Image: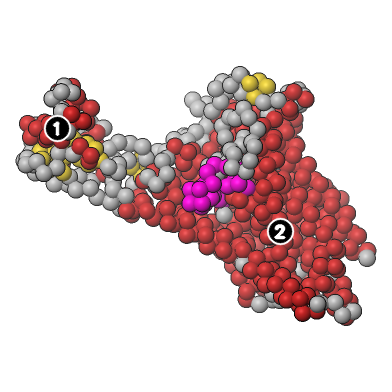
């Protein structure tokens, strides 16, 4: 009797906790969507901030974030994929691979502000890039490298070994096998890494604080050595240190909504691709 | 033709090999640059570069440590007697005051007579302490004594209880309040998040049906995907007023608010890792327990949870690591007061928040800049320890599964 009752109570609590976590997500999302949706308009998306960032739009910040995303992907994506190909296809299961995996895990666990410090020391000061798209992109690229490597490795692992042995048996070299058989099969899953990285990069603030982000710029960037505004930093600025924090509140809600939209869209997209193609690989 | 192809193939393979090491190289570079800048702090003089402190040579005090200098300039110490000198009131002399005593003509062309005049002032006042740029310093003048400038010591940094990096003449880099702030905020966060996260993990792995799982897992992933500035914004606009009202505080930006937002942010990590550990429990163990007449709940807390204890502790460790390194959200809701924390309901300052808030204003290469890099080093070392610990713990769990 008592056993059953305590079980029922415990399970009820777990169920409530489960609901609570979902509730928290919807609370945060609902809060931002509810307050931000009224702000969104063509003008908000496609014009620059005016009146000390209390009105106008966020176009320069969107462009800036786009530049940083593209820049960091150009750097991290090829490098990450090559690294994953090496560990998964070439290195076997030696201590080298174990070492590399540990290092990748460690890199992933370093806080983003430390990447910011490092980017400032190396790219901004030592290499003399200054606060620029280039410095910011390299810093962000390094930050998402472990994510790219991990998703690519998983994608490569999901390719059945029979694909490889089949291709090798037909006389293809190892590189040909990878290029013509393994990579095409793994490609959809590899793109989830790209998409997740885009989501991650567009939301990061701490790494670009001192490497790329500008408080306010009326102009759009014209080259890779220009400073840019960026969505997450813009949100931080108008929430904490804008010229008139109260007046720029609606702008903040709008910016948060755009930011969250981009980030969650990427996450959801990646989830669907993974689900869809994993089924396909299995049924093959 | 075939030969060229083979060479090409070799080249590509070696490029792949090199890129395999890219993360290791990145970590190596991070270590080098962080520590190079950070350790420079211990070679910086404790007063600002290019400045020195001068006293009358009759003064029996021969050197002052950082705390003493601060006390003098804060007027907490007003007599040389307290520092081991003669019974004289301390007279603070600032460089600008020289222009009130002497006219520009008296100081000569291009201020060439400035050092001499400064020397005169110091000789006339036996109780004086003067903070002067070395460029105009009254060196080689009898009756003037420069206090030796000491380097900032490791003890000053790790044992100091005050963080005042912009104080003049001698900034204070006591890191204790920041370390304590970081620890308090993240440990409370985990204490909040652990029961919640563990509960959800149990629900997901033991109770929920396949469909609920398929809906809830992505939800949790999305929670992990929300950028930290957005969490910070949410915390600032929603949680801060709630905390202020519920606990009747004058400001809502407290350590506790930071813990709350961090708890939410750490939830996905804790849930995912703990759930993996719970699912790792072999089926026969569960079935044996059930066959002995235990209820499902008894099986969970007497068999499944003890079995996956190491996996759950890995979740805790990883959660703490995440929380300690979190920057933006904490920066926005904890109120940023770099003082020794006395209660949960006071503003605090964490290590990452300090870096984010101050690096922009610290001139590159200066002591302040270096001190922030050293904070980065501390953070780096902590996260390395956390990550390795978690790895060791979860390896234990894996071995159990075999």
Q: Chain of mark 2?
A: A
Q: Nearer the viewer, residue A56 or B160?
A: A56
Is A119 in the magenta? yes
Is B214 part of what is drawn in magenta?
Answer: no
Q: Indicate which disc residue B36 carries.
A: none
Which residue is drawn at the image coordinates 42% and 44% (left, top)?
B364
Measured in 3D between alpha carbons, the distance from the residue under mark 2 to the one under mark 1, in whole angstroms, is: 65 Å
Left or right: residue A227 versus residue A275 is left
Occupied quadrant, residue A25? top right
- Can residue B177 be seen here? The reply is no
Counting the numbered discs, the total is 2
Q: In this rendering, would B314 be left or right of B361?
A: right
Residue range in magenta is A111-137
Residue B217 coordinates in the image, percent (x, y): 78, 50
Of the 4 image quadrants, the one containing the C terminus of chain B is: bottom right
For the point 14% across and 42% down, the residue is B139
| Residue assigned mark 2 | A78
Secondary structure found at label 1: loop
């Amino acid at each position: 009797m008592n056993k059953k009752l305590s079980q029922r109570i415990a399970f009820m609590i777990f169920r409530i906790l489960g609901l609570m976590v979902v509730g928290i997500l919807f609370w945060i999302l609902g809060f931002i969507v509810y307050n931000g949706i009224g702000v969104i308009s063509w003008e908000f998306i496609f014009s620059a901030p005016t009146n000390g960032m209390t009105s106008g739009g966020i176009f320069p910040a969107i462009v800036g974030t786009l530049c940083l995303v593209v820049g960091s992907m150009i750097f991290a994506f090829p490098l990450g994929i090559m690294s994953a190909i090496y560990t998964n296809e070439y290195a076997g299961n030696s201590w080298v691979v174990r070492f590399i995996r540990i290092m990748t895990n460690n890199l992933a666990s370093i806080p983003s502000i430390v990447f910011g410090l490092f980017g400032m020391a190396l790219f901004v000061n030592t290499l003399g890039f200054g606060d620029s798209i280039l410095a910011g992109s390299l810093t962000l690229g390094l930050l998402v490298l472990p994510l790219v490597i991990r998703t690519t490795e998983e994608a490569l692992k999901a390719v059945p070994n029979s694909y490889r042995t089949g291709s090798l048996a037909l006389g293809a070299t190892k590189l040909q096998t990878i290029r013509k058989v393994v990579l095409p099969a793994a490609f959809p899953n590899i793109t989830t890494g790209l998409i997740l990285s885009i989501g991650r990069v567009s939301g990061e603030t701490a790494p670009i604080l001192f490497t790329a982000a500008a408080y306010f710029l009326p102009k759009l960037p014209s080259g890779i050595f220009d400073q840019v505004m960026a969505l997450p930093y813009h949100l931080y600025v108008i929430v904490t240190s804008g010229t008139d924090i109260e007046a720029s509140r609606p702008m903040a809600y709008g910016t948060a909504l755009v930011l969250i939209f981009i980030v969650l869209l990427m996450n959801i997209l990646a989830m669907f691709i993974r689900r869809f193609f994993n089924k396909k690989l299995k049924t093959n | 033709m075939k030969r060229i192809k083979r060479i090409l193939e070799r080249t590509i393979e070696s490029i792949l090999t090199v890129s395999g090491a890219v993360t290791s190289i990145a970590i190596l570079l991070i270590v080098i640059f962080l520590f190079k800048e950070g350790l420079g702090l211990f070679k910086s003089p404790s007063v600002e570069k290019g400045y020195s402190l001068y006293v009358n040579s009759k003064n029996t005090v021969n050197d002052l440590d950082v705390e003493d200098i601060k006390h003098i300039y804060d007027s907490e110490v007003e007599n040389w007697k307290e520092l081991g000198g003669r019974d004289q009131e301390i007279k603070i002399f600032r460089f600008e005051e020289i222009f009130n005593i002497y006219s520009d003509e008296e100081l000569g062309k291009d201020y060439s007579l400035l050092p001499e005049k400064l020397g005169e002032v110091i000789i006339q006042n036996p109780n004086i302490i003067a903070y002067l740029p070395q460029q105009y310093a009254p060196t080689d003048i009898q009756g003037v004594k420069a206090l030796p400038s000491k380097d900032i010591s490791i003890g000053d940094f790790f044992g100091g209880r005050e963080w005042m990096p912009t104080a003049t003449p001698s900034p204070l880099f006591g890191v204790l309040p920041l370390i304590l702030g970081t620890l308090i905020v993240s440990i409370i966060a985990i204490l909040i998040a652990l029961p919640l996260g563990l509960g959800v993990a149990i629900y997901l792995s033991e109770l929920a049906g396949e469909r609920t799982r398929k809906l809830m897992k992505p939800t949790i992933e999305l929670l992990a995907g929300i950028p930290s500035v957005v969490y910070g914004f949410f915390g600032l606009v929603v949680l801060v007023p709630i905390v202020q009202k519920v606990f009747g505080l004058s400001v809502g930006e407290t350590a506790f608010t930071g813990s709350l937002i961090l708890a939410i942010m750490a939830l996905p990590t804790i849930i995912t890792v703990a759930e993996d550990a719970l699912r790792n429990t072999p089926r026969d163990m569960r079935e044996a327990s059930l066959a002995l007449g235990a209820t499902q709940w008894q099986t969970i807390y007497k068999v499944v949870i003890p079995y996956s204890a190491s996996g759950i502790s890995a979740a805790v460790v990883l959660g703490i690591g995440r929380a300690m390194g979190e920057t933006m959200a904490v920066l926005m809701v904890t109120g940023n007061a770099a003082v020794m924390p006395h209660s949960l309901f006071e503003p605090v300052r964490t290590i990452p928040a300090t870096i984010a808030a101050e690096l922009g204003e610290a001139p590159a290469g200066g002591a302040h800049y270096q001190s922030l890099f050293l904070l980065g080093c501390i953070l780096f070392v902590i996260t390395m320890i956390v990550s390795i610990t978690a790895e060791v713990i979860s390896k234990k769990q894996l071995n159990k599964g075999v």
